[in-house]
Amino acid sequence: MTADLSIRPGPSIRRSPLRDWASTLTELAPAVTLTERPYLTHTTVWVDPTSDAGQAISTGLGVPFPAAGAFTQGRTRFGDVQVLWMGPAEFLIISPDGTDIDVQVAIDSWLGGRWAAVVDVSAQRTIVTLSGRHARDVLAHGCSADLHPRIAPTGTCIATLLAQTGIVLQVLDAEAGDFQLLVRSSFAGYFAAWVADAAAEYADPVQLAESL
């Protein structure tokens, strides 16, 4: 039996995983700027990128599958899309909010009966961008990965630990120190508390005193 992907769910009340931390995280600027990007569509695809099925998906999407430890991005029929390498033959497509069914239906049509596994995992993680002059310093407090631009250039995508919590880390701009983190929704509060503590030493003394 094949599910009818044309049937869309009704409206729901959504709550961002970091909603309650918005004001606290805003106070970290300008040393560190942290912005949540909730509700984006996350689609996991298991496919050999060199196979006919993999080629069909990348051609239809218009964004190539990335090499190991990297991500690709581009403008597509769904809007701005990123494709992240998550492991051998495993990729994560990040697309705009509300495109989950459109992406799955499109992939099914591109495959034309060829094999690939496609799963909507949008509720699994929230996305956070981290930038500012001390972004790399803050990450160094709890991440053992070497994020120096020579080692982790723009376009890098790795699964690593931050404060003993698994994350996916993307380097958006190595020279500027701009990063994007995929954090498990269930660990979002812990992540926010840790970042606020790690960034405290870089905060403006006057601003920090006023927030106490």
Image (cartoon, rainbow, N blue to C red):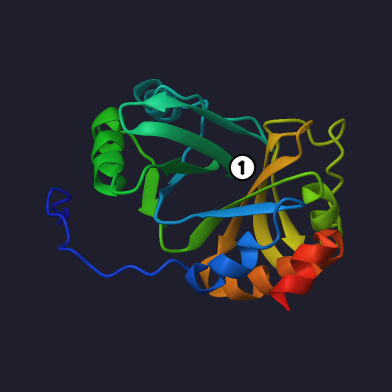
Residue 71 vs 161, above or below: the answer is: above
Q: Is residue 52 visible?
A: no
The answer to which of 4 and 133 lies nearer the viewer is 133
Tell me what residue is drawn at x 41 percent, y 22 percent: 62
Displayed quadrant of residue 105:
top left
Q: Is residue 115 left or right of residue 143?
A: left
Find residue 88 and report its horizontal and vertical position in percent. Answer: 61, 42
Displayed quadrant of residue 182:
bottom right
Q: Is residue 206 visible?
A: yes
Displayed quadrant of residue 95:
top left
Find residue 100 and report its horizontal and vertical position in percent. Answer: 30, 48
Residue 136 vs 163, above or below: the answer is: above
Q: Is residue 85 left or right of residue 32?
A: left
Q: Quadrant of the N terminus?
A: bottom left
| Secondary-structure class at tag 1 | loop
Q: Is residue 159 left or right of residue 110?
A: right
Tell me what residue is drawn at x 30 percent, y 27 percent: 77
Q: Which residue is mark 1?
A: 88
Find residue 47 and report its horizontal and vertical position in percent. Answer: 47, 39
The answer to which of 71 and 174 lies nearer the viewer is 174
Q: Quadrant of the C terminus?
A: bottom right
Dot 1 amino acid type: Pro
The answer to which of 185 and 22 lies nearer the viewer is 22
